[in-house]
Amino acid sequence: MSELDKDVARILAAYESAVFKKDVRTFMHLYDPSVRVFDAWGVWLYEGAEAWQRAVEGWFTSLGTERVKVTFEDVTSWVGKEVSSVCAVVTYAGMSATGETLRAMQNRITWVLRTSGHVPRIVHEHTSAPLGFEDSKAILVRGNAA
């Protein structure tokens, strides 16, 4: 595994850990100050780290005593010295204070990373879920690939 591939693995692990710990500071350190986020929930666009941080703080606060276990699957990355991209299926599992899984959902995620000063940071994030043809509702559990 190259150093650049190791950087992607570190970012995935840091994201998982920061979400589980509800650690806004570590989470936001993964993002570039000029990040642009197309989130799947409620808001069309978050422009800049300050706007994204407010959303993340709201998410983490809304959890109360619950935690979220993040798991990445089917990770594919295209890694370069200055710009890289990563896409994956991400599972967010709500966990009780005693460690019981309460619920889970999946999204598709794509990141564009830019390396500055030897540190890759997320400059663009796009999350999505497909919509059902019959009811136009988000499909939050991955089925078989077409």
Image (tube, rainbow, N blue to C red):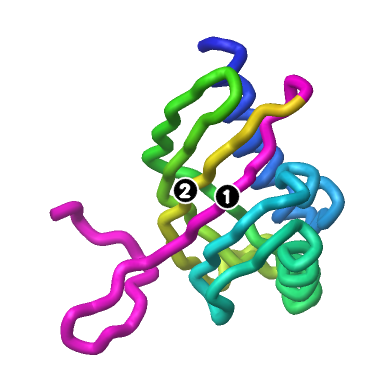
Please tell me whether residue 3 belongs to the stretch shown in magenta.
no
Q: Which residue: 58% across, 18% down?
A: 81
Mark 2 and mark 1 lie on one chain; the one further toward the N terminus is 2
Residue type at the position of mark 1: His
Badge 2 vs badge 1, beta-carbon distance below 8 Å:
yes
Residue type at the position of mark 2: Thr
Q: Which residue: 67% across, 64% down?
A: 47
Q: Position of residue 29 (x, y in %)?
A: 79, 44
Any part of residue 97 in sight: no
- Above or below for 134 versus 40: below
Q: Nearer the viewer, mark 2 or mark 1?
A: 1
Horizontally, residue 98 falls left or right of residue 6, namely: right
Write down the region rendered in magenta: 117-146
Spatial CA span between label 2 and label 1:
8 Å
Res 55 quadrant in image: bottom right
Any part of residue 116 in sight: yes
Horizontally, residue 8 falls left or right of residue 65, namely: left
Q: Position of residue 60 (x, y in %)?
A: 76, 68
Report which residue position mark 1 lands on.
124
Report which residue position mark 2 lands on.
110
